[in-house]
Amino acid sequence: MGYSNRTWACPYFKWDGKQKVTCEGGCVSLPKQEFSEFVERFCASPSGWRDCPTAKALTRYYERTEP
């Protein structure tokens, strides 16, 4: 739980701020409506986070580098 009181589904989530979310892959900052749509579609979605391009890249990285 962070600034927005959302429940974050993505395992790569670190923290959020006003219209900004930070994960292991970087930071997304968008205008209010677009930010809300983005996080609901990806970061806060129990299945949608897997479709996020950043989450996909991180998953591939961890699969490749973990023993």
Image: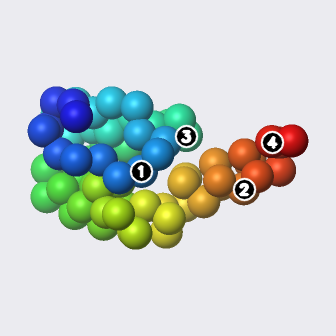
The residue under the point 31% across, 63% down is: 45
Q: Amino acid at mark 1?
A: Cys
Disc 1 is placed on an element classified as: loop
Q: Amino acid at mark 3?
A: Gly
Query: In whole angstroms, how far apart are the C-alphas of marks 3 and 4?
Result: 17 Å
Q: Which residue is mark 1?
A: 10
Q: Amino acid at mark 4?
A: Glu
Q: Crowding near pointer 2: few (<14 within 10 Å), some, many (20+)? A: few
Q: Crowding near pointer 3: few (<14 within 10 Å), some, many (20+)? A: some
Compared across the picture, whether 49 is left or right of 53 comes to left
Of marks 4 and 2, which one's residue comes earlier in the chain? 2
Q: Is residue 17 above or below residue 51?
A: above
Q: Which residue is mark 4?
A: 66
The residue under the point 55% across, 40% down is: 25
Q: Amino acid at mark 2?
A: Arg
Quadrant where the C terminus sits is top right
Disc sitting over residue 60 in the figure: 2
Q: Which residue is mark 3?
A: 25
In depth, the one of 47 and 37 nearer the eye is 47
Of marks 2 and 1, which one's residue comes earlier in the chain? 1
Quarter-of-image position of residue 56: bottom right
Q: Is residue 34 above or below residue 8?
A: below
Disc sitting over residue 26 in the figure: none
Please identify, in this view, whether the residue under mark 4 or under mark 2 is nearer the observer. Answer: 4
